[in-house]
Image (cartoon, coloured by chain):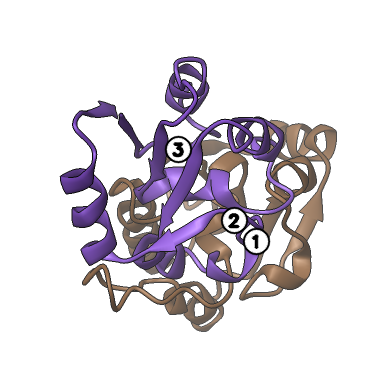
């Protein structure tokens, strides 16, 4: 909340694949922190960011933490608005059934409209 | 020659740059985020399949498993583990990493 107590609409924009860089994990941690501030928080996944939600990640052999179960825990922090861009899924041979959480699939034009409604966008 | 690519084709142009320089008899190893290019339905699949006509294409299994893509690998791409990675490096006279 700002000094007037207004709740702002935040959208965290995730565009990076997990594991190849630290962006996805860092973004997720900031999202969890944001839950403590009673704001209106949503997450958008586009481009390689859709891979963050791929079901069945197994990081045993690369000896890296598998943080994908955390996306399923977001609901417990009242973060329930997950948006995934349809074009990004299609360009990667993925469907909604390949994802580990329930999401709202939006076309790029709808995603653009959603972004236009936000007060703050934070990109990872 | 063994070409190694580690960046996602959805993020960088290193894969297409590499594939433009692959010659008959060469090998291409996809690791880290480049393994996404080895998966069915990906926008890069056509360029990988074209490369497979002249070169051998490999993908690192641990990186596929981490990304939940081991079950979606294009037929004809050979999956290798870390031991296989070492063997590829050892058996090719030259290695080029497309960073």
Q: Name the residue located 67 percent from the left edge and 38 percent from the top edge.
A: B49
Lower sequence index among marks 2 and 1: 2
Query: Does the rendering let one see residue B33?
Result: yes
Picture quadrant where residue A81 is located: bottom right
State the image coordinates of residue A4 (x, y, percent, origin top left): 46, 46
Label 2: chain letter: A
Q: Which chain is brown?
A: A
Q: Which chain is purple?
A: B
The CA span between labels 2 and 1 is: 6 Å
Q: What element carries label 1?
A: strand
The residue under label 1 is A82
Q: Quadrant of the N terminus of chain B?
A: top left
State the image coordinates of residue B41 (x, y, percent, origin top left): 74, 49
Lower sequence index among marks 3 and 2: 2
Residue mark closest to the camera, 3 vs 2: 3
Q: Is mark 2 on a helix, strand or loop?
A: strand
Count neighbours of disc 1 (C-alpha within 10 A) and say few if under 14, some if 14 to 19, many if 20 or more.
many
Label 1: chain letter: A
Foreground: B32 or A122?
A: B32
The residue under label 3 is A123
The CA span between labels 3 and 2 is: 12 Å
Q: Name the residue located 60 percent from the left edge and 71 percent from the top edge.
A: B71
Picture quadrant where residue A29 is located: bottom left
Q: Residue A42 carries which label?
A: 2
State the image coordinates of residue B99 (x, y, percent, origin top left): 28, 27
Tell me whether the residue at label 3 lies in contact with that at label 1, contact meaning CB atoms closer than 8 angstroms: no
Label 3: chain letter: A
Tell me whether the residue at label 2 lies in contact with that at label 1, contact meaning CB atoms closer than 8 angstroms: yes
Q: Which mark is residue A30?
A: none
Foreground: A75 or B39?
A: B39
């Amino acid at each position: 909340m700002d000094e007037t107590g207004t709740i702002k609409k935040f959208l965290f924009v995730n565009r990076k694949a997990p594991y190849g860089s630290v962006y996805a994990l860092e973004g997720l941690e900031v999202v969890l922190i944001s839950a403590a501030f009673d704001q209106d928080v949503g997450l958008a996944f586009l481009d390689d960011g859709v891979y963050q939600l791929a079901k069945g990640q197994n990081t045993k052999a690369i000896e890296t933490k598998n943080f994908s179960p955390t996306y399923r825990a977001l609901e417990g922090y009242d973060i329930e608005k997950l948006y995934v861009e349809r074009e990004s899924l299609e360009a990667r041979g993925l469907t909604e059934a390949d994802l580990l959480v329930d999401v709202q699939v939006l076309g790029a034009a709808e995603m653009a409209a959603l972004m236009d409604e936000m007060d703050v966008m934070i990109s990872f | 020659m063994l070409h190694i690519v580690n960046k996602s084709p959805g993020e960088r142009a290193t894969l297409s740059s590499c594939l433009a320089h692959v010659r008959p008899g060469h090998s291409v190893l996809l690791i880290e985020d480049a393994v996404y290019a080895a998966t069915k339905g990906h926008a890069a699949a056509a360029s990988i399949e074209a490369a497979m006509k002249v070169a051998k294409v490999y993908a690192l299994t641990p990186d596929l498993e981490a990304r939940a893509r081991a079950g979606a690998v294009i037929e004809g791409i050979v999956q290798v583990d870390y031991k296989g990675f070492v063997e590829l490096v050892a058996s090719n006279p030259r290695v080029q990493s497309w960073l």
